[in-house]
Image (cartoon, rainbow, N blue to C red):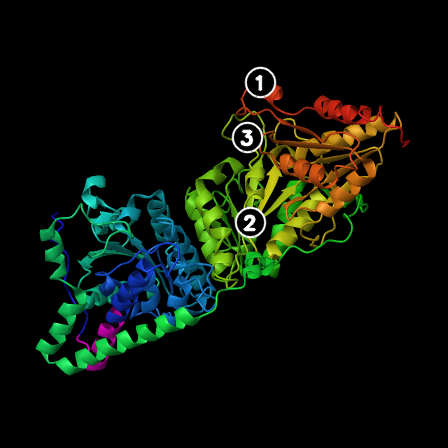
Amino acid sequence: MSLMSPQASSIQAPALGTDESLHLLEEMVLIRQFEQTAYLRYLQGEIPGTLHQSQGQEAVAVGVCSLLRTEDWITSTHRPHGHALAKGLDPAAGMAEIYGRETGCLGGRGGSMHLGDPALGILPSIAIVGGGITIAPGLAHALKHKGTDNVVVCFFGDGAVNEGAFHEGVNYAAALNLPVIFVCENNMYGASTPFHETTRNINVASRGESYGIPSEQADGMDVRAVRGAMQRALETARSGKGPVLLEFLTYRYVGHSRGDARGYRTKEEEAYWTAKDPIKTFGEALVEEGTATEEQVKESTKRAKKRIAEALKHAQQAPWPDPETALAPNIIYGNPPQKVEGAGPLAEDGEEDRFISIAESIRETLHRELATDPDLVLLGEDVGVPGGFGGAFGVYQGLAEEYGRDRVIDTPISEKAIIGASIGAAIGGMRTVPDLQYADFVFEAMDELVNEAAKQRYMSNGKLTIPMVLRCPVGASQRGAQHSQCPESFFMHVPGIKVLCISDPYTAKGALTAAIRDDDPVLVFEHKLLYGAKRQEAGSINTKAYVPEENFALPVGQARVRRRGKHATVVATFTELYKALELAEKLAEEGIELEVIDPVWLNPFDWDTVMESVKRTGRLVIAHEAHLTGGWGAEVSARVSDELFADLKAPVRRVASRDIPMPFSPPLEAAVLPLAEHIEAAVREVLSANHNRTESE
């Protein structure tokens, strides 16, 4: 297909009256004037950062959004100005945002690439190509769960259809029959590269058949043709028939960004598309058809330009945000980390028949939270199939039968879509507990976790919360390098995500309950060898402990002192925690008293409990199965050494897995893992480092 000969449907919507036609024209002029004004001010240095524009594509934004309700949602791209304005964003709030001012729609935290206003159904736009395609199904799930006929419109460009997110998001929406209208603005270029040079099948609409959903290609330079296609899509989506894929052939008159001089285009090509200008041709058509007078068209244009002039004046005069608000924890987290009192109970005593495993404790927790909160859903692979696995480790068995498969949801094998949909549903008012079977698979969804779950609340200036709990089984168990990792340390580095490590049944119930009830995304890591479940791993450790029958919430960010001592502090998680406890029993016979701490939360980390302990003992050993380099122990060691240097009687020691991919063979695996003797050697080393000291214990 030639870049100058779009073969698209030009079927239009039913005839429009004068007022509605002039409104569409005014909205298109508004977008054009907003972008041109912003561009000129950007060149003059008034607007910081970067700017991506869409002059020429106004008919798509206006034609689509003019048919939406406030309660409908849209997701947009790094080129979001037109979509946001067409959905109802105040031009003054939009202009102030790209100026980085306090009165911007997101308080200056989003800027040009992240415009949005959740109150208007505008998700802060996503600057990662294709990023919104996995979020949109989750928002749609929330709308469907609430019993509405509202829809989600997901805008993306032609380049995004080659992202894995496109396949996963569209297939997910189709499989779950969700009300999403996927809108591809095919402007024929991905940055400067022609679409046909990177894609053999350039008919995006034809891909709908692959997912079993209706699709349509239409002329994106004709606002009435866009509305016609959109009306048909809305009839499908609102009536419960599932998603629709729309492709609008359009053209971007400006370059990809400021430095793009468009040298890769021909003058003939640009002249062809300029003649199809959606504003000029629509205004002329209204006059020719007698729908409006030439004076009315001029007045509509004048009104739009006046609105933008006022928006510009507002932005130029608006104050800068207070720099101190950049650090406000209530904007990073829905439930900001609070100072916790004490370090949790040492042990729990109770009825013998309430000594249960971690797997049983997790199942009980989920069961009772599902019963309590009708907006809570579990979703993942093999979690609800009748007679199925009940998840990779059997934790979900019986829950689908009790609560239904609309609450315990089987998903495609699509990690990006599972997490993206979980995030979207959480934004839409649900609480979600996704499952990825193995923590190793979390890397398939790093974009969704790190760029969306962690940042949407902050980018939205605190207007959004994302109550999502992702369960991730970790640890070596003779499964090889791709099913044995401990990636929890990666996420300690990401502000906006909370990180929980479960090592015993009591914590499993108390901390998991707290995580589910929390308004922020929480990643829960659980070691496979500690489950004690029906499908337990070979060599699993007996971790059964007393757990109260009713759910209870332990404070978020509270460590647990598992054993009191005065000679050295050991901070450990998972299997290393049990090795440390066994070592403490052994050394007690020698008169050496170890204090053993389970940090439980890596973020927020209970620094007070660890610092207080080390200040008393003067010695610290950290043990974890995560790799030594960059493991969470490195951060703990650095902070303790920095803040308690004068109190330390020995250098901090770390015990961890070697920096080698985990091998399969048991003896090879053992050579990589931290062993009990390694922890003992580290403890004895820090104890012996005191021999040159004169102070007594």
- Picture residue at 48% right of the left edge, 59% below the top: 427
Q: Quadrant of the C terminus?
A: top right
SS for dot 3 = loop
Q: Residue 495 carries which label?
A: 2
Cα gap from disc 2 to disc 3, whole angstroms: 25 Å
- Residue tagged by mark 1? 668
* Residue 519 image point, x, y percent: 58, 58
Q: Where is residue 560 in the image (x, y as percent from the top left)?
A: 74, 44
Q: Earlier in the sequence, mark 2 or mark 1?
A: 2
**Disc 2 to disc 3: CB gap under 8 Å:** no
Position above or below: 232 against 443: below
Kindly state the secondary structure of the residue where label 1 is placed: helix
Q: Is residue 13 left or right of residue 656?
A: left
- Does residue 561 belong to the magenta stretch? no
Q: Neighbour class for label 2 at 10 Å: few (<14), some, many (≥20)? A: some
Residue 166 seen in the current view = yes
Residue type at numbered disc 1? Leu
- Residue 383 or residue 29, whichever sits in front: 29
Q: Residue at x 18, y 62 (%)?
A: 221
Task: Please state if 122 lies on the left or on the right of 359 as rendered.
Answer: left
Give the amino acid at mark 2: Pro
Q: In which quarter of the image is residue 284?
A: bottom left
Q: Name the residue tied to disc 3.
A: 484
The amino acid sitting under disc 3 is Ser
Up-down relation of residue 229 to residue 126 (above or below): below
